[in-house]
Image (cartoon, grey):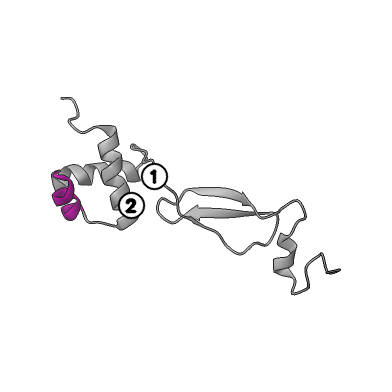
Amino acid sequence: MPNKYTPEFINEVLTVHIHKGMSQTLLGKEFGVPKGTIRKWIDKYRTGQIEVIHAHHWMLPSPDGPTVKGTCKFCGTTKEFYNSSENNLWKMSNKKKRPFNNHL
């Protein structure tokens, strides 16, 4: 039997669940989908059978080097971010000194 819900629709429902933490019951009422169907989608998402495309909300620790590992607070995806600029300004955050351009 073909799926009567498009991948885009499933993505929308799962995105609301991920970002807003909405329960399966409320999602069902909001989108007109049986709660059991939503539960299956969530289970498939958690086991990696469905990939959800959504905006990430990156959580980054304080800089302590040229790069830092960020984690999406919604899906747990990790990504490396550069702290450094061309002048390695990240070093300033670890030292309580005046900026490198202290001739001003």
Picture coordinates of residue 49, whole percent (x, y): 34, 37
Residue 15 point in image, percent of width and height: 32, 47
The residue furthest right is 103
Between 37 and 5, the one nearer to me in the picture: 5
Location of the C terminus by quadrant is: bottom right
Give the mark nearer the N terminus: 1 vs 2.
2
Q: List x then y, in percent, for residue 60.
A: 55, 59
Task: Pick the quarter of the image with the N terminus.
Answer: top left
Image point (17%, 50%), residue name: 30
Q: Is residue 43 above or below residue 92?
A: above
Residue at the disc numbered 2:
18
Q: Identify residue for label 1.
A: 54
Against 38, residue 4 (above or below) is above
Inspect the magenta stretch and tell me whether residue 31 lies in it: yes
Query: Mark 1: which amino acid?
Result: His
User: Which of label 1 and label 2 is nearer to you?
Assistant: 1
Dominant secondary structure, magenta: helix
Report the number of numbered marks: 2
Q: CA distance from mark 1 to mark 2?
A: 9 Å
Judged from the image, the secondary structure of the residue bearing numbered disc 1 is loop
Residue drawn at 28 percent across, 52 percent down: 17
Point out the residue furthest to the front here.
Answer: 104
In the displayed orientation, state which residue is furthest to the top.
1
Q: Quadrant of residue 97?
A: bottom right
Q: Give the SS element for disc 2.
A: helix
Report the amino acid beneath label 2: Ile
Other residues around mark 1 within 10 Å, as few (<14) / some (14–19) / many (≥20): some
Left or right of 51? Residue 99 is: right
Start and end of the magenta stretch? 24-32
The reply to whether dot 1 and dot 2 touch (C-beta < 8 Å) is: yes
